[in-house]
Amino acid sequence: MPGTWHSIGPSIGPIAMTDDARSWPPSLWAETAGPAPACTPLAGEHQVEIAIVGGGFTGLSAALHLAEAGRAVRVLEAVQPGWGASGRNGGQVNPGWKLLPAEVETRYGSDQGRRINAMADGACDLVFDLIERHRIDCDAVRPGYVQGAQSKRGIAFLERWTRQWATRGAPVELLSRRQAVELLGTDAYLRGMLDRRGGNIQPLSYARGLARAAMAAGALIHGDSPALRLRREGPGWKLETSHGSLVADQVLLCTNGYTTSLWPGLAAVVVPVPSFVAASEPLNNKLLAAILPGRHAVSETRRVQVYYRMDADGRFVIGGRGQFFNDAQCGDIAHVHAEARRLYPALAHVKWQFHWGGYVAMTLSHTPKLMALAPGLHAGMGYNGRGVAMATMMGKQLAMAVAGERPDMPVESMSRIPLHRLRQVALSYRLIAGTFLDRCEHLTERRGGMRLLEDE
C-alpha cells in the first residue's frame, strides 16, 4: 500500500509520507466522523461466495448491493473502512465523467454510450438515495455542483457541458459572470455552470455508513486484514492474509489508487495522483454570508485546478494538487492557502486547522475501468477525481457483473499504461505546463472578462 499522508499544524511546509499503512491519517473527516463499525481481522480459513478486496466506496457499495441480493460476501480491508481516498477526499458528490456525453457516445458507440451516460447521470442520485434509504448520518446536502471558467477555453467547455447534458434532461444551467459572483461570492470566474445533481457529504461518515448498511444486510467486513496473496484454488480463488484466508467463488478487487501487486499489472492501469486538502477554522457569520452562501460544491475548468466547499460547521475546505516532484513530500500547504486567498481575499487571516491528503486514481482515457481479469475475477477503478459518485456506482456495476447481469459499463480487459514507471516525470511535466498555460490564459483574458461583466 502507498503510505499515508498526515496532517500537521498551521505552519507552512511539506507533508511527509510514511510507510506505516496501519496508522489512521488525521484529518477534518477523521475528527468529525461518526463512530467506526466493529470490523475485526480475518482469522482462520473460510469459504465464501464472493470476496471483495478493499473497503472504500467501491468495495462497500458492491458488498451492500450483493448482500441485499442475498449473496454471501466478505470484505478484506487493509486498515478500516474508509481509510484510503474514500475517507480523505473533498467530500464533493460531482456528476458525470470527465468526458462530455457526446464524447462518450463517440468512443463507445451510440447504444453503449447512451447506457453509460444514463448511468453517469444517475450516479449522484445513487449516493443520495443510499444515504436516505439507510439513514446514513454524513452531513449530506445537495445544493448543486458549480464549475467556474477563467478562460475562453473554459467557457467553451461549460457551454458544451450545459448544452449536452440539458438535451439529456439533466438540471444544468450556464451562469453569467454576475450570476457566478452572486452564487459563489468570488469574482475569480468569467462564467460558471450550475449542475443541480451534485452536492456534498462527510465522506468518512458516508463510508462508515455504507459499511454498517452492508453488515446489516449480511456482509462480513474484516478490518486490519490486508490481502497478501491471491491464487487459483480449484474452480475459485484463494486470498491469504496474515492470520487467515478466504476461498471464494468470485473475487472483486476494489483498491483504486491504493492498488498493490496482489494481481500482476493491475497497479499500472491507473496513475495515483496526490491530492491535498486543507480546512480552516469555522468562519464567523460575516464570512459565512459572503463566501459560498449557497454551500455549493465547486471546482474549476483550469488544467491545474482546485476544488472547494463548506463543511457542516462552516469551515472552508479546499483541495488541490499535491507535490509531484518527490514522493516523500506530497503536500504543499502554502499552495492551497494561496489558492484560498486568490479566491477569497477575506480568508487571508483565518487559521487553518487541518491538512491532509491522499491519492486520486487517473486513467489515460479519463474514464473509469470495469475489468474482467480472469474467470471469476473482476476489478473496478479509475474515477479521475469524481470518485464519490462514480465509486459508489462502480460498486453497483461490479455487483451486476458477478450476478450475471449486463452492467451499464463495458467490461474491459486489463490494459496497462505504457511507461508507467515514468509516471512521476509525466505528472511533473503536466503540472508545470498546465500551470504555465493556465496563467497565460488568465492574464490574457482577465481584462476581457471584466468587460463581459460591464456588458451584462
Image (tube, grey):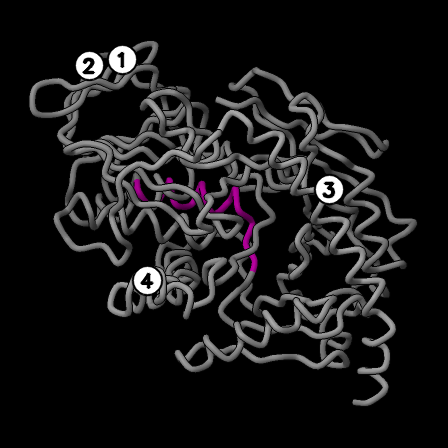
At label 2, which amino acid type do we have?
A: Glu
For residue 59, above or below residue 94: above
Residue 91 counted in the magenta span: no
Q: Is residue 300 left or right of residue 333?
A: left
Q: Is residue 113 left or right of residue 330?
A: left
Residue 77, image quadrant: top left
Question: Is disc 3 placed on a helix, strand or loop?
Answer: helix
At label 1, which amino acid type do we have?
A: Gly
Residue at screen point 83% across, 66% down: 444
Pointer 3 with pointer 4, Cβ within 8 A: no
Q: Which mark is residue 432?
A: 3
Pointer 2 with pointer 1, Cβ within 8 A: yes
Question: Is disc 4 placed on a helix, strand or loop?
Answer: helix
Distance between mark 3 and mark 4 Cα atoms: 33 Å
Distance between mark 3 and mark 2 Cα atoms: 50 Å
Distance between mark 3 and mark 1 Cα atoms: 46 Å
Question: Is disc 2 placed on a helix, strand or loop?
Answer: strand
- Give whichever of 341, 142 is nearer the camera: 341
Distance between mark 1 and mark 4 Cα atoms: 39 Å
At label 3, which amino acid type do we have?
A: Ile
Residue at screen point 57% across, 16% down: 19
Residue 202 counted in the magenta span: yes
Pointer 1 with pointer 4, Cβ within 8 A: no
First in sequence: mark 1 or mark 4? 4
Report the magenta residues as a range.
200-214
Distance between mark 2 and mark 1 Cα atoms: 5 Å
**In the image, which is nearer the foreground, mark 3 or mark 2?**
3
At label 4, which amino acid type do we have?
A: Ile
Quickly name the residue at label 4: 116
